[in-house]
Amino acid sequence: MAEDGQRFGLSDAELAAHRTVFAGDAMEGQVAVISGGAGGIGRAVAWLYARMGARVVVTGRKQEKLDALVAALTEAGHAARGEVLDVRSRESVDAFWTRVWEAEGRVDTLVNSAGGQFPQAAIDFSPKGWDAVINTNLNGTWHMMQAAAQRWRDAGKGGNIVNIVVVTTHGLYGVAHTIAARSGVIGLSKSVAVEWAPLGIRVNCVAPGAIETEGWNVYTEAARATYPKTNPMMRVGSAWDIAEACGYLAAPSGGYVTGEVLTVDGGGQHWGETWTTGKPDYFRTEDKA
Ligand SMILES: CCC/C=C/C(=O)SCCNC(=O)CCNC(=O)[C@H](O)C(C)(C)COP(=O)([O-])OP(=O)([O-])OC[C@H]1O[C@@H](n2cnc3c(N)ncnc32)[C@H](O)[C@@H]1OP(=O)([O-])[O-]
Ligand SMILES: NC(=O)C1=CN([C@@H]2O[C@H](COP(=O)(O)OP(=O)(O)OC[C@H]3O[C@@H](n4cnc5c(N)ncnc54)[C@H](OP(=O)(O)O)[C@@H]3O)[C@@H](O)[C@H]2O)C=CC1
């Protein structure tokens, strides 16, 4: 991890002003819950949804990050509030949904952006490290999905879920735990997209490639430096790229889309390789020719 907790990605001021293709009333009168909402991607989604007219409820483990975002959104004239929530606790997730439903009277969209992992060779994962990643990314996402769907079913109203995952097409070296968890989320999303269609609930995933955010602090500078060079576009993406994908899925534009994985990776899944722990000499074919 970078020792200094380096700043990466877009500031609130940039997110407030970033050009968007979406109309200011595309989510008018709606409520959106964003887990990990004060993180890099979640914050961009919160700004975009707010600018599309939604009231946003952002959650995360750190009160101060939520407070700063809510203050910036409110100052810009948007309706926002933050709640501390660890998605790994089913009890806390249920209590949160009960509170939100009482306070807001409705929720239309849930974006699960709470997540993360640490880079390590899979052979060295400790049981605790494995559990931390699976509980956060697979179980935490499921707790949020099911709690939301139960409220929608009980209220006789539909809703839509967007799960932020990872591109899993050929694994991702150094983060096998997260690939296991995200593959689970993708399979789960496809399954419940069908089961929950009769309830009017759509369920989709967005799979980001390398997106510059503060989450990158868990990777070494050397690993980060390879990300743009191993992508056909020779660059990394921004949190706004992911936010607009989430905008498309939440707005009426996504009304006939469910069970889908929208990959936003600059073509990274088709060319290039991402070594989050550094590329082992064994795979350096250019030196072996
Ligand atoms: C291009 C790349 C693609 C993807 C990019 C992104 O997603 S970027 C954006 C994504 N953003 C992020 O990824 C955000 C950053 N990630 C995180 O916050 C965490 O990885 C977390 C998501 C698992 C949270 O877990 P938590 O709150 O429970 O945190 P905790 O600290 O208490 O750890 C629990 C246990 O995990 C283990 N362990 C942890 N670190 C290491 C390590 N470096 N080494 C080895 N092991 C490690 C260890 O066993 C530890 O317990 P211990 O031995 O200390 O008693
Ligand atoms: N950036 C990238 O290159 C990529 C990101 N992704 C995925 O996108 C998602 C968002 O990542 P990004 O915004 O970049 O990273 P960040 O680290 O900036 O954001 C992740 C957020 O998740 C929250 N979070 C983590 N664990 C929990 C938990 N147990 N309960 C509640 N909230 C939690 C954190 O909030 P707090 O600190 O307040 O707890 C944090 O704000 C993650 O799932 C990530 O793995 C996928 C592919 C690439």
Image (spheres, rainbow, N blue to C red):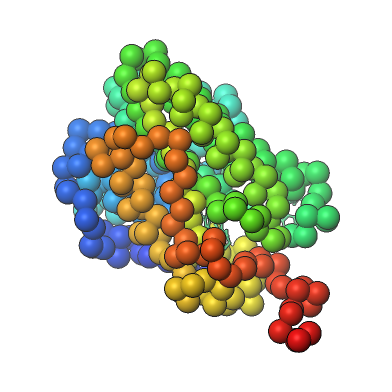
- The image quarter containing residue 255 is top left
Is residue 63 something that shows in the picture?
A: no
- Residue 233 in percent (x, y) is at 45, 73
Is residue 266 something that shows in the picture?
A: yes
**In the image, residue 102 above or below residue 28:** above
The residue shown at (29%, 22%) is 105
Residue found at the very far front of the displayed protein:
289
The residue shown at (59%, 75%) is 226
- Asked whether 71 or 289 is in front, the reply is 289
**In the image, residue 214 above or below residue 176:** below
- Residue 42 in percent (x, y) is at 42, 50
Looking at the image, residue 192 sits to the left or right of residue 139; the answer is left
The residue shown at (80%, 44%) is 127
- Residue 289 in percent (x, y) is at 76, 86
**In the image, residue 228 above or below residue 145:** below
The residue shown at (78%, 55%) is 122
- Asked whether 271 or 66 is in front, the reply is 271
